[in-house]
Amino acid sequence: MLYFAYLDEFGHIGPYVARDDPAYNDSPVFGLGGMILPYSSVRQFSTWFYQLKCNMLAWEIGQSGQHPATWEKKGSALFTSMNVEKYRQVRTAANRILNKIRASGGHVFYVGLEKNRPVAEFKAQALYLTVLGEAMKRLNQYADQNDADMVIVMDEHQDRDAILTRASQAMYGGPSPRRRIIEPPFQVESERYQTCQCADWLCGLVGRVGAYQARPDEWADMAWSQTYFQDRLDAASVRSSIRLQTAATEVETVEALPAVVDTGLAQPAPGNDDTPA
């Protein structure tokens, strides 16, 4: 069996102080997420999502003047409090996507961390690479459990070289090479891939869930993420979590990448051995 994992970012890669901070207020969490699909379901799922998008957002697509195949609605713009509370079709679409992924033999997948370090100590690239390493570890475990191989497809990123280096080191080096991942992640233009657009929608939802979990007092208006979606998201997900407050800094010792050791995250709580690899 061969699986495809489609990943995008959720939350925000930069520092976070508070929602009312004038500069650092985007999101208290950061992570990578999306979905895992067996190769035999990819084409059919892509068509299904395309049709869902076209039906639900026909007016916006028409106004854009673009072909629907290359028109993209960002998940962060779709899953706003106003849209979710006001438009039932947005809630229905999210639940249909979760159900369709499961019916296609796949799962939702996400790995995230709460950002805790002061702004002056924050290292965005190190955070990204550590989360990527943890995602690859879990995807490799998923493939191993299913006696399968894994291909990772990601949205384009400006740190392409660093990402490919980190991925290659995880695949071929360290104490536990990720042998089930057959190539370093492919980076693509998300507007041209319906599967990547769907991963972005999922990240838009997961990002809201994470923000509310991390700072419910500051993000109280996101309580709908728990009310409408938490149980369904849990049921559709595998090897997924957003690590809050006790996010660890340890990673595998991978030669030639010392910057990953200092991720800009809080130290683990005593006795917590659930550390990223």
Image: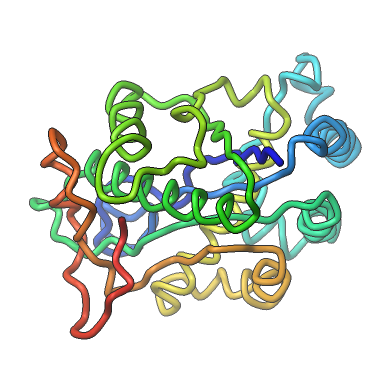
Report the residue at 45% width, 77% height from top. 216
Q: Position of residue 169 (x, y in %)?
A: 29, 35
Residue 243 in picture, x, y percent from top left? 38, 69
> 150 or 77: which is nearer to us?
150
User: In the image, what residue occupies the spot 21% across and 74% down?
Assistant: 268
The reply, left or right, for residue 249 in relation to residue 91 is left
Residue 59 seen anywhere in this rendered image of the structure: no
Quadrant for the C terminus, please.
bottom left
In this orientation, does residue 176 appear?
Answer: yes
Position of residue 215 relative to residue 56, above or below, is below
Give me the residue at 50% from left, 75% from top: 220
- From this view, report whether residue 118 is shown above or below residue 223: above
In the rendered image, residue 37, in percent from the top left (x then y), is placed at 71, 44
| Front one among 3 and 119 | 3
| Front residue of 187 and 190 | 187
In the rendered image, the vertical position of residue 76 relative to residue 151, given as above or below: below
